[in-house]
Image (tube, rainbow, N blue to C red):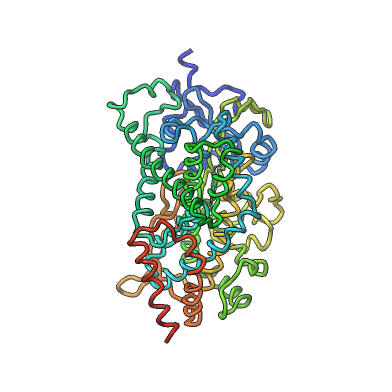
Amino acid sequence: IVLKVGSREKELPPGPPTIPILGNAHIFPTEFPHYKFTEWARKYGSLFSLKIGNDTVVVLTGAAAVKELMDKRGGTTVDRPPSYVGELITGGLHILFARFSSSAWKTERRAAAAILTPQATNQHLPIQRAEATQLLHNILHSPQSFYTEIQRYSISVIYSVLHGRRVPQYETKEITGYIAVMHKWSALLEPGAVPPVDAIPILKRIPERWAKWKRDCKRVRDLQRARYFRLVEETRERMRRNQHNGSFMEDVLERQAELGMDDEMTSWFGGTLLEGGTDTTTSYLQSLVLALVAYPEAQKKAHEEIDRVVGEHRMPTLEDLEQMPYIRAIISETHRFRPVTPLGAPHATLTTEEYHGHIIPKGTTIFVNMWGIFHDPALFDNPEDFMPERYLLAENGTKPGIDGSDLKPTFPFGFGRRICPGMYLAQNSINLNAMNLLWAFDFKPDIDTNGNPIPVDIFAYRKGIATAPLPFKCRITIRTAAKARIIENEFLETADIFSKFEVGLSPEDKEFVARSREPEAKLLSE
Ligand code: HEM
C-alpha cells in the first residue's frame, strides 16, 4: 500500500514519472513553476497531471480544455485547494482562498458581484482619472521614481474606491506598512516556506513555540486585521459625519445586515479586495513600461496613433480608445506577453470529472497555465516577442488559420465562478494609464557613463502567484512642452475630486498635499 502512495493512477492524465511516496513532489518547481509546467505541457500534452503524495494536480495548457472544464463545468471546478496558511492568517475569510463549502466565499462573492459590475465600476472613474493624472504629474517631476509611483497609483486608487481614503504619496506609513505586510504574507505562501501542512495535516499540530512559521502567520494576521478593521471603522465614522464619497465599503456597510456580514467578515472582505487589486494592477503597468522600453517600434506606432487621434491640446479620455486599435492591441499584448498571474489562482474540483478519456478525481488541484497558452507557438507567431500587430490581424491574437475563439479577452482575469471580481475596475485603470503614458512620455533604455543604452531585462521578474518586473531603470521624457503644461493644469483640477478622499490623512500627508499643489498654483497665477 505504501508503495502505491505517490504513484499515478492509470486513468489520470499523463505526466512526469513518479517515485514512491513523494510522487512528483521532489521535482515540483519551487520558483517560476509556469516555465516547468510549460515544458511538461509540450511533452505530456495540454492536460497533464502531477502526484504530490496521494494528492493530484492537473495542469491545463489548452484553451479548449479551459473553456470546457473551467467555464462550462465551472460549477465543479469552483473550489480552491486547502490553504492552512490562508486559514491561519484570515480565519477562512479571505475571498481568494476561501473554500466553496464555506459560507464566507458565497457571502463575499455576492457582495462583490452586486457592486463591482461594469456600470458600478464606472462610477469610480473620476477618482481613477484623477489618480492617473497624478501619476503623470509625479513621473513628469520625478521620472526615475516611475516604478514606485505606479505602485502608489494602484494602492491609492484601490484605497479610494474601496475605503474612500486616498494615499497621496509613496513615502508614507500607510503604504510602506501595507507593502511590508504584503511581502511577509506572500513569503509565507512561497512553496517551501512552511512544512507541507496541507498534504500532511498532522504537521498542523506542531506547537507554536517550535514553529516560527506559525508565529509569523500570527504576526501577519494581527497586522492585517488591525489595518482592515481600522479602514472599515474610518469609513463608518465618515458616514456618521455624513461625509459619504461613494466608496464601495460605504455600500457594503449600509447593506451589512442584508448581506449577512458581521464586522469580522466585512473587515477581511474590504482588506482582501484591497490585496487583490494592488499588486496586480501595479504589475501590469510596470510590465507595460518594460515592454515599451524593450520594443521601441511598437511604442513609435502607438505614439503616431495617439498623436493623430488625441493631439497635444488635451489629455486622452476612455472614449478615445475606440478609435485607437493599435493601443488596444498593445493593451491585449501586454496581458499575453507578461500575464500578471502566469498560473492564475489554483482551483479545485468538487466532483470527479471525465475529460477526453481521462479522470480528474474529486479534490484535484487545477492550474490553468496561462503562460503556457499565451506562449504556445502552435497558437501564436513568435510568442516570445512583444508584437501588438497580432491583435490587429485576429481578435484574440492567434496566428492565421487558428481558431482563437476560446481565448476570451477576460482570460487574464481567470475563470468560471471565480473570475476576478475586480476586472472591470482593473481594466479601466489599465486603459486610462496605457493611453496617458503613451500620450505623455517617451520611454527609452537608461544609458551608461559612455552614453550607451543599457537594455532592460524582460525576464527579470519577481517570484510568486502574481509576478511583476523587478525594479528596473529607464529614461522617461515628456514628449512636448505643451503636454507638460496640460498635465500641470489637469493636476490642479484634480484637487476638487481628491478633496473628498483626503480624509484621515497623517499630518505629513496633509503637508505633502498642500505642498504638491503650491508650485503649480504659483505658475498659473504668474
Ligand atoms: C490587472 C489586474 C488584475 C488581474 C490580472 C487579476 C487577475 C485575477 C485572477 C487571475 C484571479 C483568479 C481567478 C480564478 O480563480 O480563476 C483573480 C481573483 C481575484 N481578484 Fe483579481 N486581478 C486584477 C485586479 C483586481 C482588482 C482591481 C481587484 C479588486 C478590486 C481584484 C480582486 C480579486 C479577488 C477578490 C479575487 C478572488 C475571487 C475569488 O476567489 O472568488 N483583482 N484576479
Q: With respect to residue 257, does 459 lie above or below?
A: below
Q: Position of residue 149 (x, y in %)?
A: 41, 62
How many numbered marks does the figure carry?
Answer: 0
Left or right: where 64 falls relative to 475: right
Q: Is residue 474 left or right of residue 346?
A: left
Q: Quadrant of residue 41?
A: top right
Decide which of 24, 53 is in the foreground and name it: 53
Q: Residue at x 64, y 60 (%)?
A: 391
**Where residue 517 sits in the image (x, y, percent)?**
41, 73
Q: Is residue 525 above or below residue 12?
A: below
Q: What residue occupies the far left of the structure in this picture?
A: 209
Residue located 45% across and 14% down the image: 2
Q: Quadrant of the C terminus?
A: bottom left
Q: Quadrant of residue 400?
A: bottom right
Looking at the picture, how far across and down is residue 365, in whole percent? 54, 32
Residue closest to the far front: 241
Q: Looking at the picture, how far across and down is residue 115, in whole percent? A: 61, 48
Vertical comparison of 523 with 437: above or below: below
Seen from the viewer's position, the closer of residues 210 and 325 is 210
Single out the residue that lies furthest toward the top.
1
